[in-house]
């Protein structure tokens, strides 16, 4: 785990390339405090900041090269099957110089230089890499299947700049830091910036499962893996699903323990992190360290449940109580975000990562379980129990659906949960999948979000861009049941845009590597092949996981409804005098949002406008102030 950066700029002298690399790698030192390295030649440069996890010696320092130094690589992440790949490559005559897992990349490329997309296809892990072929003057940029590791790039007028963060890319002298107002608008709706766009014009996020090949002054984007391919199987029997999931998760958790440093686990009181920790504990053979953030006295506090799980599994458990002064750590957390991210759980994770880093360098997390097994509330209208009306003749339900949709305006539904549920349920029957699903992700009305932008920025906003992206993804999906399609959609959008972004930035802010065993390809295949989903209530979802938890975590944990790793934001923003003073102070320093709209939002308070939009505005303004970005 670390940070990578580099550039291709044909004709630029090596000395100038080295100078540019210094500027690119500077924002990434926090991701890799154990050392740095660079490769530079005329027109090409690769840089690396190191967090030493596998092969802690100097031999594992990157960039890494093949035997005759005609292929160079820098990589962020972990290749879990590097030992098997190494044995095969050594059998073919390749000579390794280090024990680094990333060294397999240069030798795999030598074997598949005529079909470079075969390189990432053979990797089991989380990764973002840049590989340079000296002879062909070819650059490869690759990203793992689901986007666990980030990789951004800018390409214009012969220049290609890339890096592990947006900040690194726009730190280059020839990359303009011009805001993309459509991305800002989408952030206000979704709480994160959806890829492949970024908050800056001209800076792109390399899509998950993709390989960018730059050669001869031109680039092409290849897709080497599609998550839809994992949904071809069908498992209808629950017993079979549980057995296959147990085997896949047991293997994945054990493989994810691969490291030359100690590995711990984030352990909430929920199903997903509990199972990951249980399987990892079984594979480790010694007590793992586990970590949990608690909110003493709050309804969202999962501390007691986590303690129960830790006691049952025998982990060495540490807790981090989070009480008052909610915004005290906001500046530090936002500094670690290269793009604004308004998930309240990010703050909790930021502080928890600091605690964990005092003990370990690597942690396992339970992220991905809800996206794989339909654990979110937004999935409920698409579960079989909600599809009864669709099985009836269209004339029996469409008039009623139209009436409900017309009589309950969206503004009224936003303040009445029962009306909102009714409108969403019937609206889903009337609209296409994109139109019915996307609004369920919004935290405020589109008109309200647009009104928060400066007046001169509003006309240039593409209000349909995100919906069109979703529709394009749905269009290329194979025909399947509705819930499987929604899960496939989540795995290609909100998972990487939101959840995995949060985990990467908040852990790497403390040079802590986070690993996600539930997102191993074998686990994904079992999850997406399981079609007998019920979801009648909150304790009846994610059946295969709950069945595994019954024996490994106990009935109490197995039967718990989803809670989520969130904080009591509404109450804290409303009742804490210190927090309210911080809000007013930040209001006076606003530089991005429309002053009158921002003032109205703050004066109305969380009770009137909603705590989440208010928090999104605070994060955005803090981000802009730190980076000296303004609407002008």
Image (cartoon, rainbow, N blue to C red):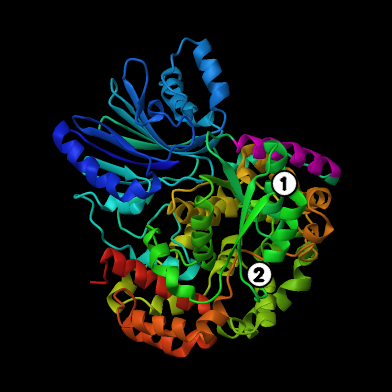
Residue 265: % across, % down = 61, 49
Q: Quadrant of residue 183?
A: bottom left
Please provide the residue range marked out in magenta. Answer: 239-257
Query: 10 Å neighbourhood of mark 1: few (<14), some, or many (≥20)?
Result: many
Does residue 15 appear to the left or right of 480 in the view shown?
A: left
By secondary structure, the bulk of the magenta-drawn segment is best described as helix
* Residue drawn at the location 28% of the way across and 48% of the way down: 26
Q: Is residue 244 magenta?
A: yes
Q: Quadrant of residue 296?
A: bottom right
Is the C-beta separation of discs 2 and 1 under 8 Å? no
Q: Is residue 542 above or below residue 393?
A: above
Return the x and y of residue 442 as percentages of the image width and height.
53, 70
> What element does badge 2 sit on?
loop
Q: Position of residue 32 (x, y in %)?
A: 39, 44
Number of residues whose C-alpha sits closer than 10 Å to that of mark 2, classed few (under 14), some (14–19) or many (20 or more)? many
Q: Which residue is mark 1?
A: 278
- Residue found at x 71% / y 54%: 310
The C terminus lies in quadrant: bottom left
Work out which quarter of the rendered image holds the N terminus and state it: top left
Residue 450 against residue 267 in the figure, above or below: below
What residue sits right under mark 2 in the picture? 301
Number of numbered discs visible in the structure rendering: 2
Is residue 348 one of those drawn in magenta?
Answer: no
Towards the viewer: 147 or 431: 147
Sequence-first tag of 2 and 1: 1
């Amino acid at each position: 785990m670390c940070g990578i950066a580099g550039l291709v700029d044909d004709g630029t002298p090596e000395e100038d390339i080295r100078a540019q690399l210094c500027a690119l790698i500077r924002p990434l030192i926090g991701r890799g405090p154990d050392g740095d390295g660079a490769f530079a030649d005329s027109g090409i440069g690769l840089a690396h900041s190191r967090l030493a996890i596998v092969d802690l010696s100097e031999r594992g320092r990157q960039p890494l090269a093949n035997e005759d130094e005609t292929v160079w690589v820098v990589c962020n992440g972990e290749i879990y099957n590097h030992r098997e790949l190494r044995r095969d490559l050594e059998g073919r005559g390749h000579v390794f110089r280090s024990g680094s897992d990333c060294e397999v990349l240069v030798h795999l490329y030598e074997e598949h230089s005529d079909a470079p997309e075969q390189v990432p296809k053979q990797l089991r892990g989380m990764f973002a890499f840049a590989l340079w072929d000296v002879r062909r003057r070819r650059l490869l940029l690759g990203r793992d299947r689901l986007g666990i590791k980030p990789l951004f790039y800018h390409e214009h007028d012969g220049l290609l700049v890339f890096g592990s963060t947006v900040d690194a890319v726009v730190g280059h002298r020839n990359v303009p830091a011009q805001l993309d107002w459509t991305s800002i608008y989408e952030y206000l709706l979704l709480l994160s910036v959806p890829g492949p766009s970024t908050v800056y014009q001209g800076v792109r996020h390399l899509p998950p499962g993709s390989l960018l090949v730059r050669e001869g002054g031109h680039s092409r984007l290849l897709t080497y893996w599609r998550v839809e391919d994992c949904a071809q199987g069908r498992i209808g029997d629950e017993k079979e699903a549980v057995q296959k999931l147990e085997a896949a998760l047991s293997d994945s958790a054990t493989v994810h323990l691969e490291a030359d440093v100690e590995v711990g686990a984030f352990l909430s009181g929920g199903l997903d992190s509990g199972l990951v920790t249980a399987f990892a504990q079984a594979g480790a053979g010694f007590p793992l360290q586990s970590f949990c953030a608690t909110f003493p006295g709050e309804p969202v506090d999962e501390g007691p449940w986590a303690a129960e799980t830790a006691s049952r599994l025998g982990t060495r458990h540490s807790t981090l109580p989070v009480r008052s002064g909610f915004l005290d750590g906001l500046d530090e957390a936002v500094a670690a975000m290269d793009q604004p991210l308004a998930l309240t759980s990010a703050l909790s994770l930021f502080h928890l990562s600091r605690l964990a880093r005092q003990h370990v360098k690597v942690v396992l997390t339970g992220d991905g379980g809800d996206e794989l097994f339909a654990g979110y509330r937004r999935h409920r209208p698409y579960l079989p129990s909600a599809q009864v009306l669709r099985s009836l003749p269209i004339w029996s339900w469409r008039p009623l659906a139209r009436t409900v949709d017309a009589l309950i305006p969206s503004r009224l539904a936003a303040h009445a949960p029962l009306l909102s549920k009714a409108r969403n349920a019937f609206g889903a029957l009337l609209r296409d999948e994109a139109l019915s699903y996307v609004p369920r992700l919004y935290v405020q009305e589109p008109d309200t979000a647009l009104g928060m932008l400066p007046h001169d920025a509003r006309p240039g906003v593409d209000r349909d861009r995100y919906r069109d992206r979703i529709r394009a993804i749905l269009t290329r999906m194979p025909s399947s049941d509705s819930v499987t399609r929604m899960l496939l959609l989540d795995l290609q959008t909100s998972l990487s845009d939101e959840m995995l972004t949060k985990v990467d930035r908040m852990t790497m802010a403390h040079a802590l590597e986070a690993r996600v065993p539930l997102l191993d390809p074998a686990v994904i295949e079992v999850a997406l092949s399981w079609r007998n989903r019920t979801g009648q209530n909150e304790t009846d979802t994610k059946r295969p996981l709950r069945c595994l938890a019954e024996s490994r975590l106990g009935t109490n944990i197995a039967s718990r409804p989803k809670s989520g790793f969130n904080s009591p934001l509404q109450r804290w923003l409303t009742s804490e005098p210190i927090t309210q003073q911080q809000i007013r102070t930040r209001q006076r320093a606003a530089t991005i949002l429309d002053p009158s709209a921002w003032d109205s939002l703050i004066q109305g308070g969380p009770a009137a406008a909603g705590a989440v939009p208010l928090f999104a505005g605070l994060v955005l303004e803090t981000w802009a102030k730190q980076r000296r970005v303004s609407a002008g």
